[in-house]
Amino acid sequence: MEILKFITAGSVDDGKSTLIGRLLYDSESILADQLEALQSSNRKNDDGTIDLAILTDGLKAEREQGITIDVAYKYFQTEKRKFIIADAPGHIQYTRNMVTGASNSNLAIILIDARKGVIEQTIRHSFLVSLLGLPQVVVAVNKMDMVDFSEDRFNEIVKDYQQLASKVGLSNITYIPVSALKGDNIVNPSKNTDWYTGKSLLDHLETVEIAIDASVTHAYLPVQWVVRPQTDELHDYRGYAGRILSGSLRVNDKVTVLPSGFTSTVEHIELLDKQFEEAGAGLSVTVRLKDDIDISRGDVLVSNALKPQVSQLIEADLCWMDTRALDTSLTYLIQHNSKVTRARIQEVLYKVNINTLEKEYGEDFKLNDIGRIIIKTADPLVFDLYQNNNNSGGAIIIDSRTNVTVGALMLRANAD
Amino acid sequence: MSKYNLDYLDELEAEAIYILREVAGQFEKPALLFSGGKDSITLVHLAIKAFRPGKFPFPLVHIDTGHNFQETIDYRDDMIKRIGEKLIVGYVQDDIDNGNVLEQKGKNASRNALQTVTLLNTIAKHQFDACIGGARRDEEKARAKERIFSVRDEFGQWDPKRQRPELWNIFNGKINKGENVRVFPISNWTELDVWNYIRRENIPLPTIYFAHQRDCITRNGQLMAASEFLNMDSEDIIENRNVRFRTVGDMTCTAAVESYAFEIDDIINEISASKISERGARMDDKVSEAAMEDRKKGGYF
């Protein structure tokens, strides 16, 4: 059994919380004491049924204000898959939450209200899903009950969305007509949409392809920690501990240590008592090499077949996440996996108006702004282009005055 | 190797090991908070995988309320002997004796709330900059919103509105003077995942997790172990019941469930079919709907 991580994009008005509540409820992932709290709550739907949206309500502060202020993670499981939902609020001021949630997801569900069709926030959400490079997209056309389950209306929305998708560069899109409130096409196919021949939402989530393809790229393992027992019997033991972020690593593979460029051969791939002949992306392992070379935290082991980028000047998409605007005269820290180095934003190339998708020019970069920049780093970064590998092409910017994470970077090109 | 899927337990394990190694790489004085419960026992097992054949780059820290199940303390001491790592114990009794906290009175008195003070004092005394804990996001809705690296101010407070965005697998452990970080490597695990992992890895557990006979009383609809630590009176009727514990905490606030699950397979079947969530058996969450959020803001685990 594997894990599918997905994000839901939409606002409260689109019935996003109800959709998540419905998935949890209908897949019987709600336990008795949670259900009891749900039933004893005085929030009910107009027809007196339980308001499923309560299931995604988190904090007291949010309940008081009736809003969702942060990403909440929800877990449920069926016989086929385990699911992790990153529930990010859809309001414009929370772009950063959606970017955060999307960065750890394999799939996005974009909710569209069947009465309203493709609107400004749909553009915004779709742009962000494209920016973060999620491999799979579901467009859930919700509130179909409010448009009499009209096939024409559904097709009209699909057509509109296809235009948007080609504009923002989204592919692998599945369209599903649903009613989260009534349960149509959420877990079971609905009798109300006999014209729809596709899968229900849950059926799709259980079966959509999420396999890791290890053959298309080099092995990439950032070293997090060097295991050195320094005991009498293990005097010379040096194990390089890290998680393989792409490709696969085999015993006897030739590897290069970047950025230094030293080469060696893999002698052991292990974890406690387990020895691997081959280990693929996603696994945390400890690697021992034939030669004793200088490797420390932040260095990257790569297989020799294909090389990642090594550069100090990088073109990247930036999403700004702090209330204090970007200051191009300031030195920030950049963290890329386990590597931290100083960096400066050398140039703002353009910003994108995420409601119209038009480019805008100017130096100011404020909270939730997104655009293209050139960043210069003190030490070289060893990275893949984000569009080729989400795990080794993403980085964060830290304000060294406050230590807060202030920006997300999608590394797009070597600008050297 | 071309296209493949990682099994969910392998993926959760790899993520947790990755997080533990980030703690080792990013902090000067980390610690692993060990409660004797299955989640922190799982963390110790993951740390063994992350750092062997080397030593742990952090000590284990146990906050001892003095109202423990003896089985938990026995387990802790055996485990420390087995793995050969350092253990630091902070005693709630010391804070009571020093007048830092006042013992609660009355029938529902518990030392659970007092632990927070001892925890914060222990962190301050040893100047820990990161504390690894076994909390999971599926436990409770306030936890569902917490980061894996969760920054606390010098009073140990969690501010849900000032959380750092956490992107990809990049964890920002940079902190200001006086702050520290709580790290939750098994955030993405559910209760069932933990049990399935314990079964797969053959991890030994304290015996109180399995069904046994015990003298209990019923309080507020829940079964509590009868003990010298519980303030009992003539209204409390002691009954010998077949029970087990789903979480392990202070004896005064951890409720038992009626159970005939003697083996781990029985427990997994029981949980799969269960109608009550794990924290539902914790009296300390029942106080109000926002109970956990309030305690977290105050520096609780």
Image: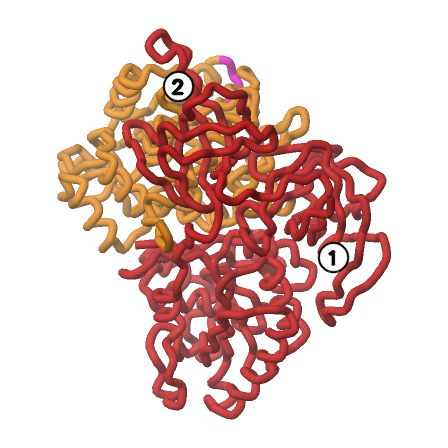
Q: Main secondary structure of the magenta part?
A: loop
- Label 1 sits on a secondary structure element that is strand
Mark 2 touches mark 1? (CB < 8 Å): no
Q: Amino acid at mark 2?
A: Gly
Q: Residue B195 in the image: state x and y as whole percent.
A: 27, 42
Give the residue at mark 2: B54
- Label 2 sits on a secondary structure element that is loop
Residue A290, by quadrant, is top left
Residue B116 seen by the camera: no
Q: Is residue B163 above or below residue A199?
A: above
Q: Residue A181 in the image: state x and y as whole percent.
A: 45, 76
- Which numbered marker is on residue A371? 1
Q: What's the chain of the residue with tag 2?
A: B
Q: Is residue B100 above or below residue A317?
A: above
Q: Residues within 10 Å of mark 2 (few under 14, many from 20)?
A: some
Q: What's the chain of the residue with tag 1?
A: A
- Which numbered marker is on residue A15? none
Q: Colour of chain A?
A: red
Query: Residue visible at 39% across and 11% down?
Result: A235
The chain painted orange is B
> Which span of residues is magenta-colored?
B98-102
Q: Residue A39 in the image: state x and y as whole percent.
A: 39, 64
